[in-house]
Image: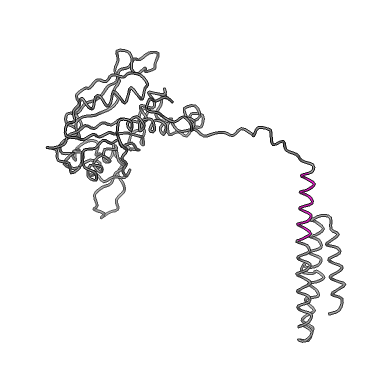
Amino acid sequence: MDGLDELRKSWLDRIGGASEEGALEEFRVAALGKKGEISLKMRELGKMTPEERQVAGPALNALKDEVNAAIVAKKAGLADAALDERLKAEWLDVTLPSRPRRQGTIHPVSQVTEEVTAIFADMGFSVAEGPQIETDFYNFDALNIPGHHPARAEMDTFYTHRKDGDNRPPHVLRTHTSPVQIRHMEQHGAPCRIIAPGRVYRADYDQTHTPMFHQVEGLVLGEDISMANLKWVLEEFYSAFFGVQVKTRFRASHFPFVEPGAEVDIQCSFEGGTVKVGEGDDWLEILGSGMVHPKVLEAGKIDPTKYQGFAFGMGIDRIAMLKYGIPDLRDFFASDLRWLRHYGFASLEVPTVHAGV
């Protein structure tokens, strides 16, 4: 095919002389587009003999590839030249301070959970965990909670859905972290000294209750454990947590999983609508506790004639409200950034056993 050398030189010269990307696109369409000069040459192959096509076909394809490569290279060269000009015109003082960035904060629940864990760890407790979806055996039966107990009603407890004909034992969103105690006794036996922090669920919602909240429960088992040990542990914990010496008062109460059972109050004063822990002549109910019921020990495969122990449970959200002056429990879960920035903690505010945060 005649004239290919002139055609190649013509397009390569035009491409090489282009000064902007818009001109390159026009050249591409004029040369390689549907009605482009090189494309029209490709159509002529159909009129040639097989021998002529064997020569002209590869030559046209090579020309097409060469023009395409020239356009891509020229486009890259123009982009590099534009960047060079921009860098010459623009400047940046790298010694200037960076733009301020908003930093996230640690949620009060997470912070208080770490505080509680640090204090109990200093007293020799380890942390135990368990599933949040439990069988009614671990959540109720193993804890000596009878079938007629109000806590087992659907108005108080979230039950998982069962299809018609599914006769498996019911599962619930755990209403306390006490099932963790049963699982730990089954797996590790006695003696033991653990806390079980985590999420729990109950069908309740108001200023001091939410459907999902956080608890920490404690369990101590041994051959010579008494209520006196329980009182010492709680007073040591609250004194470290609140940073002042805290006295406790025990009131007899009934819980199915302990015998005897006791509600525990901490010393406080009410002044100007605020609660001050560790001073005054008033008392504030803070948790439930008691000596572990023999039936609960048996459910955990522990010999109640050899071992005894105490258990207690408190709300993490509630003690966070007391310590940091948070008025409404529902705000913990409202995802309000203003609230989170106000009550949140910096990442370097690491809890210590003396609550020096």
- Quick one: quadrant of the N terminus? bottom right
Count of residue discs: 0
Asked if residue 181 is positioned above or below residue 122 in the image, the reply reads below
Determine whether 224 is above or below 133 in the image.
Answer: above
Query: Which quadrant would the C terminus be assigned to in this image?
Result: top left
Colour basis: one colour
Drawn side of residue 287 relative to residue 25, left or right: left
| Residue 135 placement, left or right of 274 | left
Measured as percent of width and height from the top left, residue 329 is found at 39, 29
Q: Is residue 72 above or below residue 270?
A: below
* Residue 239 image position (x, y, % from top left): 33, 22
Q: Nearer the viewer, residue 263 or 118?
A: 118
**Residue, x 26% and y 46% (percent of image)?**
135
x, y percentage for residue 165? 25, 55
Quarter of the image for residue 207 reads top left
- Identify the residue at horizontal 32%, vertical 44% (top origin): 131
Query: What residue span does the magenta drawing correspond to?
Result: 73-87
At horizontal 80% and vertical 69% (from top left) the residue drawn is 36
Residue at the left extreme of this rendering: 305
Q: Quadrant of residue 47?
A: bottom right
Q: Quadrant of residue 242?
A: top left
The x, y position of residue 183, in whole percent, is 25, 43
Q: Main secondary structure of the magenta part?
A: helix
Q: Is residue 283 magenta?
A: no
